[in-house]
């Protein structure tokens, strides 16, 4: 059975002292786990810290965003090559919290996706619908549009060996979670959408679920056929809860 992937998204949390304690606990509890790949995506200033602490462990690390540009006069931006300088292997792209707050278009997100690919980073593309869109029954249409932007601009083959995280916006940080059947249905839709254009890319693609995952619901979610792991927000800040989720995946 392919290994599950569990990604911690710390969002804008942490400081040097609390990070040290949390990361050391990650190492103590997760470094020897079998059949699960663990990735920690941290705020930019802490990339050096995670590189120092995790470089000789099985735990990988990454960032929560990157620039769509390679280099230049883009004040405040961080490029893919800069992330690579700190040993990053993954990067979250298009998270709804960023897309909403900073008006990121699907085209902008697609360009960031390609920057990650071009520099050997694994993009974790976030897609999902609002509660209004789900209640209106258009959730698949919404997610298809997000995915199709990349397919139409760059081709479906670019999804090979990448990650998509389905994160229903109504479930992020709310305590509400999609049921295992709801999540599986969307994951199956995503895989079939890409397979209709490029079967090999769809086969190598990992699809994670994110949105109020906790140790109690993780087992049922991760047992679904098309759920390859999770993108974990709040619970990744608790070593005990994050360990529970990782063990559910292993």
Image: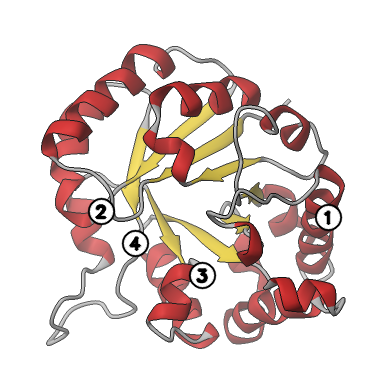
Badge 1: residue crowd in 10 Å (few <14, some 14–19, many ≥20): some
Q: Is residue 171 left or right of residue 22?
A: right
User: In the image, residue 65 lies at what x, y percent?
Assistant: 35, 64
Q: Viewer-nearest of labels 2 and 1?
A: 2
Say which element carries label 1: helix
Of 86 and 233, the residue lying toward us: 233
Q: Which residue is mark 3?
A: 96
Q: Which residue is mark 2?
A: 43
Of 243 and 171, the residue lying toward us: 171
Badge 2: residue crowd in 10 Å (few <14, some 14–19, many ≥20): some
The earlier-in-sequence mark between 4 and 2 is 2
User: In the image, residue 234 lies at what x, y percent?
Assistant: 45, 44
- Label 4 with label 2: CB-CB less than 8 Å: no
* Quadrant in which the C terminus is drawn: top right
Alpha-carbon span between mark 3 and mark 4: 23 Å
- Label 2 with label 3: CB-CB less than 8 Å: no
Of 25 and 199, the residue lying toward us: 25
User: Eyeballing the image, is 243 above or below 205?
Assistant: above
Q: Which residue is mark 1?
A: 188
Q: Which residue is mark 4?
A: 119
């Amino acid at each position: 059975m392919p290994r599950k992937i569990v990604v911690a998204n710390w969002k804008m949390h942490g400081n040097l002292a609390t990070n040290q304690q949390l990361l050391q606990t990650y190492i103590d509890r997760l470094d020897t786990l079998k059949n699960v790949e663990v990735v920690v995506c941290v705020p930019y200033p802490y990339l050096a810290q995670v590189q120092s602490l995790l470089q000789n462990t099985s735990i990988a690390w990454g960032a929560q965003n990157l620039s769509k540009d390679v280099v230049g006069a883009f004040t405040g931006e961080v490029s893919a090559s800069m992330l690579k300088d700190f040993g990053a292997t993954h990067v979250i792209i298009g998270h709804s919290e960023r897309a909403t707050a900073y008006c990121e278009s699907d085209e902008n997100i697609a360009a960031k996706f390609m920057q990650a690919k071009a520099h050997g980073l694994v993009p974790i593309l976030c897609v999902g619908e609002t509660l209004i869109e789900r209640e209106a029954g258009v959730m698949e249409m919404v997610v298809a549009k997000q995915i199709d932007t990349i397919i139409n601009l760059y081709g479906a083959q670019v999804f090979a060996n990448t990650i998509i995280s389905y994160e229903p916006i109504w479930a992020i940080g709310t305590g509400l979670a999609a049921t295992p059947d709801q999540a599986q249905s969307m994951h199956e839709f995503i895989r079939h959408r890409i397979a209709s254009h490029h079967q090999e890319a769809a086969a190598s693609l990992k699809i994670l679920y994110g949105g109020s995952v906790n140790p109690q619901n993780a087992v049922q979610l991760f047992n679904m056929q098309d759920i390859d792991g999770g993108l974990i927000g709040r619970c990744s800040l608790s070593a005990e809860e994050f360990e529970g989720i990782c063990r559910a995946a292993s």
